[in-house]
Amino acid sequence: MGLLKKLAGQSAIYGISSILGKTINFLLVPLYTGYLAKEDLGSFTMLYALIAFLNVVFTFGMETAYFRFATGKGLPPQKVYQNAQSLVFFVAVALGSLLYLFATPLSQLFDFQGKPHLFQWAAMILAIDAVMAIPFAKLRLEGKSLAFALLKLLNIVLNVSFNIIFIVVAYHITEGDILRQLQPCVAAWFRPDWGVDYILLSNVLANFLILPLLWKLVAGWKFELNKKILLPMWHYALPLLFMGLAGVTNEVFSRGLFEHALPAGFYPHLSPREAGGVFGANFKLAILMSLIIQAFKYAAEPFFFQQAENKNNPQLFARVMHWFIIFCSSLMVAVAVNLHLIGKLFFQAEGYSIALSMVPILLMGYLLLGVYYNLSIWFKITDQTKYSFYITFTGAVVTIVVILTLVPVWGFIGGALSTLACYLTMVIMCYYTGQKYYPIPYQTKKGLLYLAVSFLFSYTGFFLDSGDLLLNFFLRNGIFLLFLMLIFLMEKKELYSLFQSISNRKHDN
């Protein structure tokens, strides 16, 4: 129980920063839908899908390799850090420079004529993100979750602040609505035709400001490339690179591919790029599940590696999975039954709610991604990372096939199903392969029951409509309370044992 408490505590700190950060970031949804055209949102969706894909190339699996070699290979952790950071730094500068130089042909290839600066800024974002990756990993490994969380949160606050300044404040100043004395100065540089441009520029500025703070906090880096240290790390990381490429195809590439798979005229009054913007905006409504998965991953990866030598770790990993499914399935139902209310709060323009019905599918997809993160520990601690490539590559193929076959038929729902089908495939493959090589006593039947019932309750609540807004709120959230009652009835023995353990500990103290 003490180890679970430690993991929960670390996840809570990462989770609080993620929740606060993502909540602040989430406030950009009404800003974007209110101030930017749907075409700009489509451009934003596609460009950030490309950035996410290339980010994997820039870091090439070195974060996980750093965790593994700094904890379980008998090497000095500082030496591992210096070599990993040096290699990532060298690759990031080289690839970033290459991307910067080829910005013009890339802008033409992706139909951003006359805007090579977008790809130059993307190169800067990618290079700085990569250079910060290993220092952030070092903070996680050393248990400095609070420092990690505060820096991540500061980065998000800066990013959001620049977005508000460029997209909202500068616009209203040039229109003469506010601070008229600044109008000549702001009008000299403000570009009203820039939308996605200011989003990328904000990201660049936030990254530049956070980088020196991180390097000051994580001191002691000296450039060093030691072949004896880096060669085995490279062999360990290479399959993770391909896993990451396949994984990011599963996670974000669907948003970039969506507009190309959607037939022209599928949605009246929406071009494929505008439909891509609607698709991307609704994707953000699954953010609550995404941030929980992210917070769990931040805490769980170093935790699992540190517990790798514990003889009771299979039982520990099984309990982590069980309570992870309970928590996340409850969150999914809570969000899904209130989606109509959430959509009204965050979509500040007409035409976005037409894709709302796809969000429960995305919530389940992200939940399954979290299940996969739990399952994947077996090949990481046994150094069988080659299986990660097989599994995620299969998931990537499923993603692309489902998008190309179902988006032309079902539109938004087809795009969401690509996420669900991908992660479901990966979970099944990882579970059966893992039980063969590293058996873990998961409560599989109960976990499947929770997943199935939560998905059913999510759509029941989503489609329930009495015709009265207030009555809808109570009926839909009644479904959520019913799900919590089901959990209590099925877990009452475990919950009683947990509360009794806590009570005994307090009494002993």
Image (cartoon, rainbow, N blue to C red):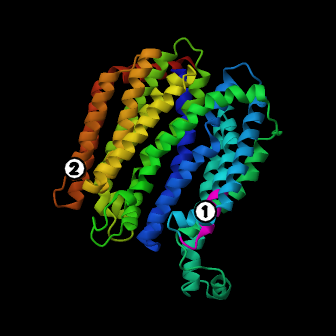
Q: Earlier in the sequence, mark 2 or mark 1?
A: 1
Residue 36: mark:
none
**Furthest residue toward top:** 311
Q: Amino acid at mark 1?
A: Phe
User: Magenta stretch containing residue 252, yes or no?
Assistant: no
Could you tell me residue 218's position as x and y percent? Answer: 76, 41
Q: Which residue is mark 1?
A: 119
**Within 10 angstroms of label 1, few (less than 14), some, or many (20 or more) residues?**
many
Q: Mark 2 = which residue?
A: 475
Q: Is residue 35 left or right of residue 401?
A: right
Residue at the (62%, 23%) spot, across then down: 306
Q: Is residue 120 magenta?
A: yes
Could you tell whether 214 is left or right of 64 in the image?
right
Residue 262 sits in quarter: bottom left
Quarter of the figure with residue 419: top left
Q: Is residue 335 visible?
A: no
Q: Quadrant of residue 156?
A: bottom right
User: Image quadrant for the C terminus?
Assistant: top right
Type of amino acid under label 2: Leu
SS label for mark 2 = helix
Q: Nearer the viewer, residue 394 or 300?
A: 394
In depth, the one of 268 and 175 nearer the eye is: 268
Percent x, y of residue 468: 19, 61
**Is 51 rendered above or below residue 500?**
below
Q: Nearer the viewer, mark 2 or mark 1?
A: 1
Q: Is residue 281 visible?
A: yes
The residue under the point 22% across, 55% down is: 472
Residue 502 % position (x, y):
48, 23
Q: Secondary structure at mark 1?
A: helix
Q: Does 222 sit left or right of 169 as displayed?
A: right
> In front here: 488 or 58?
58
Instruction: Please report the bounds of the magenta region as a residue range.
Output: 113-124
